[in-house]
Image: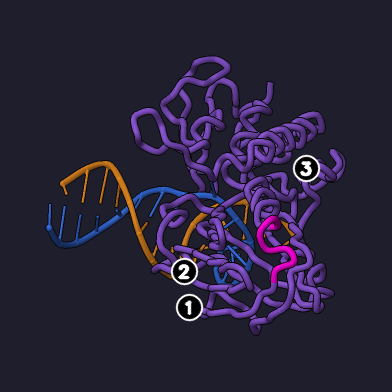
Chain colours: A purple, B orange, C blue
Amino acid sequence: MPELPEVETIRRGLSQFIVKKKLVKTTILCDKSFIGAPVTGTVKDIRRFGKALIIDLDNHNSLMIHLRMTGQLIYDGKERYAAGHPSDNFTAKLPNKQTRVILEFDDGTLYFNDQRKFGFIKALPTKEVESDAFIKKLAPEPWTITVDELYEKLQHHKNSCIKPTILDQTIICGLGNIYADEALFLSHIHPERKCGTITRNEAALIIKNAKDVMEKSIASGGSTMATYVKADGTTGDYLELFANVFRREGQPCPHCGTKLIKIKVAGRGTHLCPHCQKRSQE
DNA sequence: CTAGGATCCTGTCAGC
DNA sequence: TGCTGACAGGATCCTA
């Protein structure tokens, strides 16, 4: 799914199209993709908490949207704005087989597509957004978390591997599978290092690099979800240009030239340089 | 309490 | 061509 930078990019992009527009009708094509009762109203603002988007209406109702692994938001109006999990749906005719919810506005239609149905749209009163079970648990993002807070949390999970721990949104918020691998690579930390072995300086490094890699992605417009057309006519993923290690197994490490490898850590595909990221402490 | 694995669901791809 | 298993940019639930 889109991680924090992609969701932030969607927030900014979608705001251009639906703020001040009126949501007039909701069509639910998959029951599990919409929680609560449909609402109508004019969009006042779009907020983001971690990887969740909140669309606030002017009548104290809100829609919380989480794209999870394969969610997409495609606004079809005078022009089309498409974002989320990259696929042909961005340019396809809509609705289609993967369309789960259709939100009709006064000047366009917002399609919520989600191949695996893990994502959802939830209607709730605006005042209950911040006390929502998911939102409430979120840890601070890399821009606001302190080194002390992350370091202390890692000590509470001293026997867990560092990678799945920084994917936990209640530990540090915003990282997903791509940016976790990228941040650990830049920090020269092996994804299977036990949290108990991570030093205070290394915790600081993880925060700094998570921030750097996500800022770089936001600055380039959530580059990892966009596609471009290569000289030979085939499409490429900006992710290929952006990532140092993600989906680059077999290629040389940009730092030392060693072949990058892919392993499995806590069930997730994990990319690293076996030379730059040592399992044992220096 | 932690840590690990299974699970939700659909689709694609590699290998036989 | 058809089948099978592995895998997938997330998060929760269950078990030991």
Of A202 and A51, nearer the camera is A51
Q: On the rendered structure, is A9 left or right of A74?
A: right
Tell me the residue that label 3 is attached to: A142
Please tell me which residue is depicted at 65% across the width and 27% down the height of the picture: A186
Please tell me which residue is depicted at 69% across the width and 73% down the height of the picture: A22
Q: Position of residue A5 (x, y in %)?
A: 66, 45
Subunit that carries the residue with mark 2: A
The reply to whether label 1 and label 3 mark residues of one chain is: yes
Amino acid at the residue labelled 3: Pro
Please tell me which residue is depicted at 68% across the width and 63% down the height of the picture: A18
Q: On the rendered structure, is B12 left or right of A198?
A: left
Q: Quick check: B6 above or below A177? A: below
Q: Quick check: A112 above or below A213? A: below
- Identify the secondary structure beneath mark 2: strand
- Identify the secondary structure beneath mark 1: loop
Amino acid at the residue labelled 1: Leu
Of A99 and C10, nearer the camera is A99
Tell me the residue that label 2 is attached to: A99
The quadrant in which residue A64 appears is: bottom right
Q: Position of residue A219 (x, y in %)?
A: 69, 36
Amino acid at the residue labelled 2: Thr
Q: On the rendered structure, is A162 left or right of A139?
A: left
The quadrant in which residue C13 appears is: bottom right
User: Which region of the structure is painted magenta?
Assistant: A15-21
Residue A165 visible at all? no
Discs 1, 2 touching: Cβ within 8 Å? yes
Residue A29's tag is: 1
Q: Quick check: A179 above or below A129? A: above
Of A277 and A105, nearer the camera is A105
Count of number-bearing discs: 3
